[in-house]
Image (cartoon, rainbow, N blue to C red):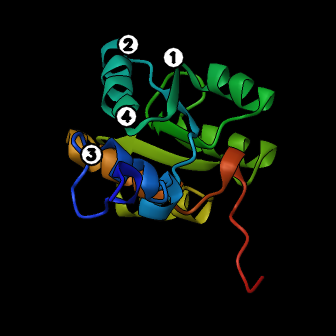
Amino acid sequence: MTPQNKKSDPPANGIENVLAKKPILPSETMPVKRPFTLLCVDDDPPLLRMEKRMIEPLGHNVETVASGAEALERVRKGGISLVLSDFQMPGMNGAKLLEAVKKVDPGIAVIIISSTMTTELTRSLMNNGASLILEKPIAQEDLREAVTNVLATIGPIGQKPETGNE
């Protein structure tokens, strides 16, 4: 038997076996994760840096601004899928920012974070389009889970995913 016809001996280094098999593509083993651009808004620089560090490992682009006005300016430039905003900020607070963001692009998800939420305020924010309300302090795992869950409901650049039979 010639070496080319020999099938019973395993390859010396396993490379031949790997090359002979169909490659496994990422889309066959796990859902494809789209990179989103998130905008964190907080007037407290240490909290803003902490939120960014907590979210970046999810693999998305995270931008930060220190005011509602700066956030609205950035949203108007386009490309933002999720705004994560503090509620209590000087000038434009989280509720006003939510309203303004939804006027620019209703598909952008908005998460409001606050340490002083009431049931009435939460209801009002949700009725005005907030995707989620989180209470401070928030654990890293909870923030990551919230961001992941909200992003799962939207398409790229703030568009709601198409549903229905194709």
Image location (x, y in percent) of residue 47: 32, 22
Q: Nearer the viewer, residue 39 or 34?
A: 34
Q: Residue at x 51, y 50 (%)?
A: 33
Relative vertical location of residue 99 with respect to residue 22 in this rendering, above or below: above
Q: Which residue is mark 3?
A: 14
Q: Which residue is mark 1?
A: 66
Label 4 crowding class (10 Å Cα cut-off): few <14, some 14-19, many 20+?
many
Label 3 crowding class (10 Å Cα cut-off): few <14, some 14-19, many 20+?
few
Mark 2 touches mark 4? (CB < 8 Å): no
Is disc 1 placed on a helix, strand or loop?
Answer: loop
Relative vertical location of residue 47 with respect to residue 5 in this rendering, above or below: above
Is disc 3 placed on a helix, strand or loop?
Answer: loop
Sequence-earlier tag: 2 or 3: 3
Q: Residue at x 35, y 41 (%)?
A: 114
Sequence-earlier tag: 4 or 1: 4
Mark 2 touches mark 1? (CB < 8 Å): yes
Q: Which residue is mark 2?
A: 45
Q: CA distance from mark 2 to mark 1?
A: 7 Å
Sequence-earlier tag: 4 or 3: 3
Label 2 crowding class (10 Å Cα cut-off): few <14, some 14-19, many 20+?
few
- Specify whether 87 is left or right of 161: left
Image location (x, y in percent) of residue 93: 54, 33
Amino acid of disc 4: Ile
Is disc 2 placed on a helix, strand or loop?
Answer: helix
Q: Nearer the viewer, residue 12 or 40?
A: 12
Q: Where's the N terminus, which quadrant?
A: bottom left
Q: Where's the C terminus, which quadrant?
A: bottom right
Q: Which residue is mark 4?
A: 55
